[in-house]
Image: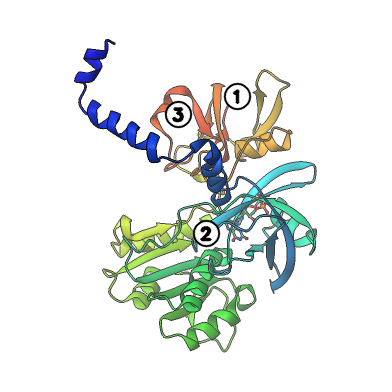
Amino acid sequence: MKKEMIEQIDGYGDIIREIDVSRKFGSAFKDEKGKVKDYISHLHPSRIQMRVLDIIDETGSTRTFRLVPEDAPLPPFIAGQYITVFVETGGIRTARPYSISSAPNQRGYYEITIRRVPEGLVSGFFLEKVKTGDVIQTSGPQGFFYYNPVIHEKKVICIAGGSGITPFMSMIREVVECGLDKEIRLIYGNRSVDDIIFHRELTRISEQFDNISYIPVLEIPPEDYSGKQGFITGDIIREVTGNTLDKTFFLCGPPAMYDFCLPELEKLSIPRKRLKKEMYGAPENIWEYPGWPEGLSQDETFSVIVNNGKPFKARAGEPLIKALEKNGVLIPSLCRSGECSMCRVKITAGKVFQPPGVPVRTSDKVFGYVHACVSFPVTDMNIHI
Ligand SMILES: Cc1cc2nc3c(=O)[nH]c(=O)nc-3n(C[C@H](O)[C@H](O)[C@H](O)COP(=O)(O)OP(=O)(O)OC[C@H]3O[C@@H](n4cnc5c(N)ncnc54)[C@H](O)[C@@H]3O)c2cc1C
Ligand code: FES
């Protein structure tokens, strides 16, 4: 472009003046090179080496693991976020997300609290094999399941099931330790008294602090029990909540709890923007979801070929990511619930079933990408990674 033409461009004079000022007074940016990148990777590290400092027995099937960093200080997090642990067990390299149960004001460690899932690969590994002093690798804090003072009401109803208590424990601890101006009512469902995680601490906190209420709900209550019984129904939620209009609702627990609680919450006509739901992994019993191919057994197996390599078998009822990992194909993953997009793979031939509600970008649909953590093989297929 000719010089005279460039000079006609809007703002040309301002830019030239800025350049002059920067030449006279600007910093030597060469010395700053890499500093922003270093700062960002401190706040959002992709991997942290953590030492298991302590292991606390919470219930017969649940333990808390206190993790301290091996080198750099821990990045800050918001109560409700999770970290993903990367492990190798039984010859399989895999990853699982766990919500941080300690408070964010505690900057020296993260605690994760893990309940054993029957036949569970990683929960079993943690409960049986991990000892104090072991070093494990985790991600930095992730996720969007947290209180946002700009859009959320100060009165919060937390509904938890089983191990879904962990993000709420972090929130409650922060409120009481930092004296935050927030009111939390926790409705916490479990099968029996012995299954309740943090029961003593929650009871003590609710007795000591007027702004924290704790309402356990038991499926199988003991004989002398006078509290709430059965499942967490709309009636229980309405009774605890009172006026639903000035409150924000948070829900966290295993998928079976959502199947029951979400319709109950719908009965209370709570608008979508005042209800926050944590994802909790791929749906169980995927074959019971609408749209599952008729007559297809969860145990049917299909052939999968990755990048024109050797074929292996994948089970219809199991997320594709698990079949990949069992066959030595490791792909990045964080949430394992269809939210973070880390596990996208391209299906070049064949089909998967994705449960309704899984967020898929339009461009992914067009170019054949899927989230392997919430995709289930329903034909033989070829994948490109
Ligand atoms: C954001 C997020 C935060 C989480 N936070 C926690 C936490 O704080 N504490 C915690 O204990 N877990 C938490 N989980 C669940 C955790 O990530 C694992 O899914 C769980 O530990 C089971 O993994 P596994 O390898 O032992 O079981 P897998 O080997 O993956 O599965 C074994 C079998 O158990 C079923 N299964 C898988 N997960 C569950 C479950 N949660 N409940 C019932 N059955 C299941 C599977 O369908 C499968 O049949 C969280 C999940 C997400 C997505
Ligand atoms: S691991 Fe997050 S979308 Fe699959």
Q: Nearer the viewer, residue 47 or 255?
A: 47
* Placement of 86 over or under 384, stated as above or below: below
Alpha-carbon span between mark 2 and mark 3: 30 Å
The amino acid sitting under disc 3 is Asp
Q: Classify 10 Å Cα crowding around label 2: few (below 14), some (14-19), many (20 and above).
A: many
Circles 1 and 2 in contact, beta carbons < 8 Å: no
Residue 336 at least partly seen? no
Residue 184 on image: x %, y %:
41, 74
Instruction: Give the structural element (helix, strand or loop) at label 3.
Output: helix
Name the image quarter holding the C terminus.
top right
Q: Which residue occupies 63% across, 58% down?
A: 73
Q: Is residue 188 left or right of residue 147?
A: right
Q: Say if 46 sits above or below 195 in the image.
A: above
Q: Amino acid at mark 1?
A: Ile
Q: Which of the 4 image quarters holds residue 182?
A: bottom left
* Residue placed under numbered mark 3 in the picture: 364
- Disc 3: residue Cβ within 8 A of ligand 2's nearest atom: no
Residue type, mark 2 in image: Phe
In-front residue for pair 111/74: 74
Q: Residue furthest front?
A: 24
Display colour scheme: rainbow
Give the labeled residue for mark 2. Answer: 77
What residue is pinned by disc 1?
A: 383
- Residue 66 screen position, x and y as percent: 68, 66
Ligand 1 is in which quadrant of the figure?
Answer: bottom right
Q: Secondary structure at mark 2?
A: loop
Q: Quadrant of residue 17?
A: top left
Label 1 packing within 10 angstroms: few (<14), some (14-19), many (20+): some
